[in-house]
Image (cartoon, helix red, strand yellow):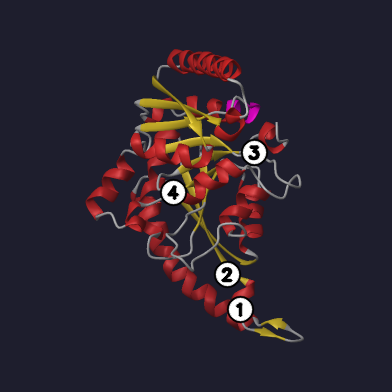
């Protein structure tokens, strides 16, 4: 399913740890990992008239090659093929360009733990890869980022596909994510939690009988999705909440102790193509569980 994976690597503290988690995608049919390091052109010393110097690029490339060798050896030790690329440019643009050139089926975009003055998600590389790309994106949340011990981290990686949260809003984009979810059957998924959150603000405006009608319809839809997933061979549980979708989904993920969230990323926003779905964006930003975001054609059209 994810035969070739692109992993943009920055050689930060958790890079190899996250790579060990990514290696578990072998269970989904992965055979090769493309390791990409982008030398950020904005961080190179720039001459007013001539731009960055080739000598600087050469020096940074030599350093990256040394670090890349360690990552490549690790990938090979897991039984996967490894290919390394070092590019110069704007990181998210190079990542998407290489993803197309290499015809990858998944991009891994790691998220470090950020503090009060840390990176703002909007405008980050992960945000831009999801916003402008049309590839499924896996956003790992390695537990050590959240002060969990090493043993817990290793267990977390081993059970990557054990229990999956599948949020749905009944859209075609959510159905596209469901199609990908079914493809994870051989990865060892033991249980799927199907969740739908009814918008609290909208429900407050409804008379009691209308709310009950909406609730009944959503329960019926949940049961239909449950049966569809059960037919594919999964054990399934449903959750129906009234509240705010982003925060409630994060809460459900923790309560159910899921190992992965699989959801669609809408191409909608205040201006089409500028912002992707606020719910999926918030889940990626604030959840401490890894997220697999699906951006199929239907999602890109905002359906």
- Residue 195, percent from left and from top: 47, 28
Q: Give the crowd class for mark 3: few <14, some 14-19, many >=20 residues within 10 Å.
A: many
- Residue 302, percent from left and from top: 70, 35
Q: Quick check: 127 above or below 189?
A: below
Of mark 4 and mark 1, the one earlier in the sequence is 1
Is 97 placed left or right of 125 in the picture? right
Q: Disc 3 versus disc 1: distance between alpha carbons?
A: 35 Å
Is 251 placed left or right of 136 in the picture? left
Determine contact: label 2, label 1, CB under 8 Å: yes
Q: Give the crowd class for mark 2: few <14, some 14-19, many >=20 residues within 10 Å.
A: many
Query: Circle 3 sits on which residue?
Result: 266
Of mark 3 and mark 1, the one earlier in the sequence is 1
Q: Nearer the viewer, residue 191 or 77?
A: 191
Query: Circle 4 sits on which residue?
Result: 140
Q: Disc 2 versus disc 3: distance between alpha carbons?
A: 30 Å
Q: Disc 2 versus disc 4: distance between alpha carbons?
A: 22 Å
Q: Residue at x 47, y 54 (%)?
A: 110
Query: Circle 2 sits on which residue?
Result: 39
Q: Disc 4 versus disc 1: distance between alpha carbons?
A: 28 Å
Q: Quadrant of residue 98?
A: bottom right
Q: What range of the chain is rendered magenta?
A: 171-176
Query: Circle 1 sits on which residue?
Result: 44
Marks 2, 4: nearer the viewer = 4
Q: Quadrant of residue 57?
A: bottom right
């Amino acid at each position: 399913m994810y035969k070739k994976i692109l992993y943009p690597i920055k050689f930060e503290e958790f890079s190899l740890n996250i790579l060990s988690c990514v290696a578990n995608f072998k269970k989904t049919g992965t055979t090769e990992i493309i390791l990409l390091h982008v030398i950020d052109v904005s961080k190179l010393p720039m001459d007013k008239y001539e731009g960055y110097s080739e000598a600087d690029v050469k020096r940074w490339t030599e350093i990256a090659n040394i670090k890349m060798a360690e990552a490549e050896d690790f990938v090979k030790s897991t039984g996967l093929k490894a290919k390394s690329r070092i590019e110069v440019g704007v990181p998210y643009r190079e990542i998407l360009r290489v993803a197309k050139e290499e015809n990858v089926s998944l991009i891994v975009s790691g998220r470090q733990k950020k503090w009060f003055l840390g990176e703002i998600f909007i405008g980050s590389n992960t945000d831009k890869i999801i916003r402008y790309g049309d590839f499924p994106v896996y956003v790992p949340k390695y537990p050590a980022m959240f002060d969990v011990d090493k043993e817990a981290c290793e267990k977390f990686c081993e059970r990557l596909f054990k229990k999956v949260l599948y949020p749905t809003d009944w859209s075609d984009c959510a159905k596209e994510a469901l199609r990908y979810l079914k493809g994870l059957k051989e990865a060892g998924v033991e249980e799927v939690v199907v969740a739908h959150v009814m918008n609290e603000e909208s429900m407050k405006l409804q008379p009691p009988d209308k709310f009950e009608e909406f609730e009944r319809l959503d329960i019926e839809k949940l049961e239909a999705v449950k049966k569809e997933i059960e037919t594919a061979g999964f054990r399934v549980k449903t959750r129906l909440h009234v509240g705010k979708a982003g925060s409630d989904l994060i809460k459900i993920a923790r309560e159910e102790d899921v190992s992965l969230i699989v959801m669609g990323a809408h191409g909608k926003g205040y201006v089409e193509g500028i912002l992707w779905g606020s719910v999926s964006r918030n889940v990626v930003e604030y959840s401490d569980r890894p997220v697999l975001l699906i951006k199929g054609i239907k999602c890109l059209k905002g359906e």
